[in-house]
Amino acid sequence: MPQHQQAVLAGTGTSPPRGRGPVVAALMLAMALAAMDSTIISTVVPQIVGDLGGFSVFSWLFSGYLLAVTVTLPVYGKLADMFGRKPVLISGIALFLLGSLLCAGAWDMASLIAFRVIQGLGGGAIQGTVQTVAADLYALRERAKIQAAISTVWAVSAIAGPLAGGLLAEYADWRWIFLVNVPIGLMALLLIARHLRESGSSAGTQTRRSVDWPGALGLFVSGGVVLFALVQGGVAWGWLSWQSLILFGAGAAGAVVTVWIERHAAEPIIPGWVWRRRVIASVNLALGALGVVIIAPTVFMPIYGQTVLGLGPVQAGFVLSVMSLSWPMSAAFSNRVYMRIGFRDTALIGITAGTAILLALTLLPNGGPAWQPALVMLLLGGALGLFQLPLIVGVQSTVRWAERGTATSSILFCRQVGQSVGAAVFGAVANAALSGTPGGVAGLRGLNGASEAVRRAVGAAVNHVYVGAVLAAGVAVLVLVFVMPRRFPVLAEGDEG
């Protein structure tokens, strides 16, 4: 190995190239835990409700997990910068496996939701730290490859998860969807423990510095309250009801207190430089908009496919899943583009194309052939892959090792918040569009057997949602053009340590 390459790897604090294979396998296995778990459970909800009851609150099987992941991402990012990636990743996987075992033994819906939150606490560590280690392992020119490989895990999970869940529900028991996590997680733990090496220049050098636990608690509580209000608003109670007003008010007050704590902390969980640096702040805003955008097809394309197009659940899921196939392929190709024209311009091409493609969704004929939305989803995945990955790699390339976990987690945090906001806003938009039509929102309960009036109403409501997604994509375009610098201040590889 050339002398300069050894120095770079020592600075980044990770295993040398010849030791990357097992570590990369561990990262993909760890990410598979989080990715598969978000898709496999959706197909066994009827069996879970039939066994445990609690139909009125089953949506919290997803929302509780999402809340826990979102509010813990910045905390784990800071801890990874202070104590090293390895202990955070190992702790996250272990916590996720504990949650999985508890979920398998749940005795009612309330206990299952609580144990899903524990899973989410581990999932936050996995998602943020895997992305950070991937950036540590690879130089700038190669980072697109590992990021694309991680995206492929999500793509495979989008297809394999529902199939595996259906098979387990039919031939075994729904509890096995949590037990199958155990061998995958144990293998990931073994590989990480044996093969991930962090040099003394990076890991363990900051362990004596105090952790901002009050700031972490403030972020967890205030963020959890706001996200809880977004999830429940317009569903359990109205947006202007006293419940919503109290929750949003409490969340805002908690945010003010958290900001005060962070400004006076020696090692804040979300340091001020995250927002003072123009590149990171603008990427956070752009990927927050992306979170809003991707909710539209993720949530409403299956409903559109089943209600308007008359497809079965598997066929409707396929129309959506083709987006997950083109996304990692485009992401893998993006390094050829951003190494030539830069991170911002590559992302601008992707989101501009994505905006036009989303607009095409609103122009599809009502009840047309299924290949048309499938083709649009395929193109959308390619455009968004070209948009997201250059921004993530770009930010990771502008920060030192000791800042990379925090910067990466802030990006993922903003995207997750965007998804939560998008789900709340688009749900309200769809409900408003359906409220004045025959059958109203209740018409969604009979997807394939819906009347022609309900089918047209759902088609119109989904179109309204896609118009909202176009507007969100337009916000991302404006951020890239007017806020984000055209050239990122990329550090030389020897300066990343």
Image (spheres, helix red, strand yellow):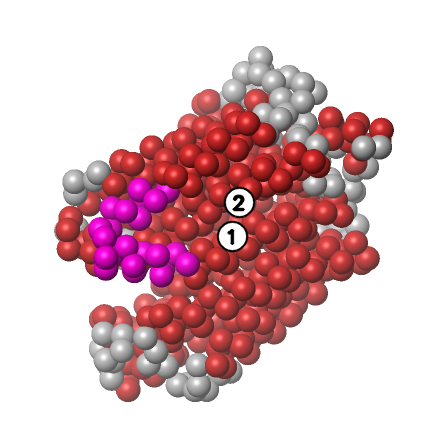
- Asked whether 193 falls inside the magenta stretch, the response is no
Return the residue nearer the eye: 126 or 186: 186
Magenta range is: 160-181
Residue 163 is one of the magenta-drawn residues? yes
Residue 215 in the image: above or below residue 161: above
Pick the residue in front: 86 or 369.
Answer: 86
Secondary structure of the residue carrying tag 2 is: helix
Q: Residues within 10 Å of mark 2 (few under 14, many from 20)?
A: many
Counting residues from the start of the chain, the first of labels 2 and 1 encountered is 2
The answer to the question of whether label 2 and label 1 lie on touching residues, with beta carbons closer than 8 A, is yes
Examine the image and state in which quarter residue 448 appears. bottom left
Q: Along the horizontal axis of the image, is 296 left or right of 266?
A: left
Element type at marker 1?
helix
Mark 1: few, some, or many residues within 10 Å (few <14, many ≥20)? many
Mark seen at residue 153: 1
**Relative to 276, does residue 337 appear above or below in the rendering?**
below
Q: Position of residue 196 (x, y in %)?
A: 59, 30
Residue receiving disc 2 = 28
Residue 358 placement (x, y as % from top left): 54, 72
Name the residue rendered at 85%, 29% in the picture: 3
As drawn, the residue found furthest toward the right would be: 3
Q: Amino acid at mark 2?
A: Met
